[in-house]
Amino acid sequence: MVRDTGTDDARVRVRPNPKGNRPRTKKRPAYDDAVPALVLGVDRGRYQLLADDGTRLVGMKSRELGRGSRSAVVVGDRVRVVGDVTGRKDTLARIVSVEERTSALRRSAEDGDAAGVERVIVANADQLVIVTALADPEPRPRMVDRCLVAAYDAGMEPVLCLTKSDLADPGPFLSLYEALEVPALVTSVADGEIRGVEAVRERLAGRVSVLIGHSGVGKSTLVNALVPGAGRATGGVNVVTGRGRHTSSSAVALPLPGGGWAIDTPGVRSFGLSHVSADDLLAAFDDLHAVAQNCPRGCTHAADAPDCALDEWVAAGHAGTAGEARLASFRRLLAAKTGAPD
């Protein structure tokens, strides 16, 4: 005989459902009324958004998007939001989906418990503008090399922007990147004004550009000249270390007067690239990539790699002096990928 132990039995203790009484379901809302928007900035879990109709919103990430670096929402992302999308003060929208990215600038940790963990810094940008000073502080070629590797890996076009040419000749530094055919812009300061800023403005017009560089190179000063009213904090160089002080604390997308966006990023002291493989980097060099198809399996393409087809290509004279220089530049970037910046 089966004894009835229903809820009327005093001996039965029914635990309440802490998540409510609604039955679980794998079906998710379609959010057909979601509003498309662009992520302009991220600050402590709150997202500054610009809806397609021009409304400025503040949003938060919905729980269903998940947690961790793989589900991160970053500056430049195209998202869809629901909730209060009026933009009124103290209202909060909710990000429910992220559209597929056209590019993703990544950086990975290379020490400590987080070693090897990569995260996306900026999404959907067209070009990476690597800002470096020619003096005060001294240029750091290996840091520039690592930024170039990150740009090639992200599928973004790299651009060199050399500041403070009034203090040093840009020629020797530019010669390091001649074989890579990286576009270069040169600025200087005279009587408190930045000369060459018009060329930078023309290069950025109509594009989504990320500006990156170590502290003290004049990046925030350049951004303020490009975007009137941007108000990015500027700082000098530490007289003891010879390095700049951090002034920008987070990435932010700023609209350019001539169209397009300039995404200013915090000054960097290092740029982890453990997520980038030799083949990833090689793919950015069309001529070298085609030759490398004849390399033995597992070839590292480094200078000491045995039977590397790239060396045979140069030795046979097929490459010419330009090809030889490009191979040397590729291998310099390959070495910079695994070495610490100077």
Image (cartoon, grey):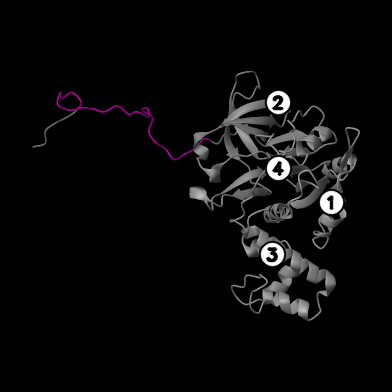
Of the two numbered discs 1 and 4 in the rendering, the one whose residue sits closer to the viewer: 4
Of the two numbered discs 2 and 4 in the rendering, the one whose residue sits closer to the viewer: 4
In this view, 169 is above or below 304: above
Q: Nearer the viewer, residue 50 or 161?
A: 161
Q: From this viewpoint, which residue is outermost toward the front?
A: 240
Three-letter code, disc 1: Ala
**Which of the marked residues, 1 or 4, is nearer the chain's N terminus?**
1
Give the side of residue 334 with respect to residue 92, left or right. Answer: right
Crowdedness near tag 3: few (<14), some (14–19) or many (≥20) residues, C-alpha within 10 Å: many
Mark 2 and mark 4 in contact? Answer it, CB < 8 Å. no
Q: From this viewpoint, which residue is outermost toward the top?
A: 89
Q: Residue 282: give its label.
A: 3
Mark 3 and mark 1 in contact? Answer it, CB < 8 Å. no
Q: CA distance from mark 3 to mark 1?
A: 22 Å
**Which of the marked residues, 2 or 3, is nearer the chain's N terminus?**
2
Q: CA distance from mark 2 to mark 3?
A: 42 Å
